[in-house]
Amino acid sequence: MLWILCLALCGLLTRTRADPGALLRLGMDIMNHEVQSAMEESHILEKMAAEASKKRPGVKPIKGITNMKVKDVLLPVISLSFTPGVGIFQCVSTGMTITGKSFMGKNMEIIVVLNITATNRLLQDEETGLPKFKSEGCEVILVSVKTNLPSNMMPNVINKFLDSTLHKVLPGLMCPAIDAVLVYVNRKWANLNALMPVGQMGSVKYVLTSIPTTAASYIQVDFSPVVQQQDGNTIELADAGEAPEFPADSAEGSSQLLLSAAFLTAELALLQKSFNLNIHETTIGELPPQTTETLAGFIPEVAEAYPKPKPLVTQIRINKPPKVTMKTGKSLLHFHGTLEMFAARRRGKTPVSLFLLEVHFNLKIQYSVHEDRLQMATSLGRLLSLARESSSIGAFDEKELTGFIADFLREAYIPAVNDVLQVGLPLPNFLDMNYNLAELDIVENALVLDLKLD
């Protein structure tokens, strides 16, 4: 009994370690860009300075200074560094001019250069499940102070006054700016776990597996995506064995999104029925006419059954979910199904089945990105197997049809598959990410998008 329990636990642990899905690494390139954009676009320091100049009910004026105003706030310079296991350490260097009436009755002007430092802890919001940053330990450090007050007049008193005044004013003025900027950044996660449609067949939702983790050079966000059919049923991601990994040669500070082959397989399962096809045309691309006469060139028994040419009708059914496989530099889409050929009859008459084949073939996949969707274009890889299941024209060697069927798939079926794939697979919506500049790389069991900034 204990032995069985150990096996079960080991199996569970293995599945946990190999959890397939999607992984996101945010390097300093994107985090710098997002924090800088939030600071600039929100004009938060200017807003805080204007707020500080207002008289607020219930707030006592600072002793020794009246008519205080803040102006000429310098454009902030932001420095970030990752704090492993915590989040991001942030330093904002800026400056401003504080004016007012001093305790000596004179117009006062203080030019201040300062650093605002804080730790932005990365958490997971309990209500929404989304990542969020929360500021901790904000400090204001004075770099330099210049004033128009005479330095030779009671220097100790003036210095004490400046020190006490600035330490009273600046933290309350500047630290809220950090919090306000983080609110701005956090909003850009808002649509991350929204349902995103895959055509009319279902949807994908990117759900966080756990609290994002911070390493020395990146933040990692692990997803367990939920792939859901239109009727509400969930498609489980297959256990892929070893979990896919980011390339070891990724540039320092860069950002990547990894999509596992198991995840892409689950998404394509939503489209399985769309890959079923009935083809009635007799003229298709460069193929010879799709008639019993052409087919008789490969299977003589057809000519005996149909001395007069009849148009062919071909029915392809995919009876297993499509499967994506990936090796370094190469990705394939596997189809298992049936191919049945019929001889058409006069209008209103049901076509007659000639034979039913079980088929297994693969398609080469070429990936690209358009806006927030992963696009796939396919071409025939190999026709891996043909097996005759039934035949109304007697026994024949199905291997004789290999070339004929391969040409048919290439000219008639694959263009229809590519039309279905134009729906695209949704990519996670976070931080207003522009995927159009991403560089794509196929690695073992995964597709990696190397994310680039505008």
Image (spheres, rainbow, N blue to C red):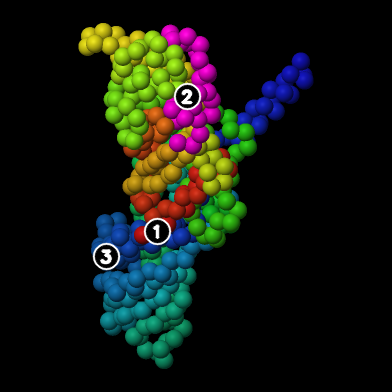
User: Seen from this angle, which residue lies furthest left?
Assistant: 347
Disc 3: which residue = 50
> Pointers 3 and 1 in contact (CB under 8 A)?
no
Q: Is residue 73 left or right of residue 388?
A: left
Question: Residue 390 versus residue 247: which sits nearer the camera?
Answer: 390
Could you tell me the amino acid type at mark 3?
Ala
Disc 1: which residue = 453
Instruction: Identify the mark at residue 124; answer none if there is no mark.
Output: none
**Of circles 3 and 1, which is in front?**
1
User: Seen from this angle, which residue lies furthest bottom?
Assistant: 152
Instruction: Tell me: residue 76, above or below residue 301.
Output: below
Disc 2: which residue = 401
- Quadrant containing the N terminus is top right
Q: Is residue 4 left or right of residue 307?
A: right
First-in-chain label (2 vs 3): 3
SS for dot 1: loop
| Structural distance between the alpha carbons of marks 2 and 3 | 80 Å
Q: Where are the magenta residues, as a range?
A: 380-406
Q: Residue at x 50, y 30 (%)?
A: 383
First-in-chain label (1 vs 2): 2
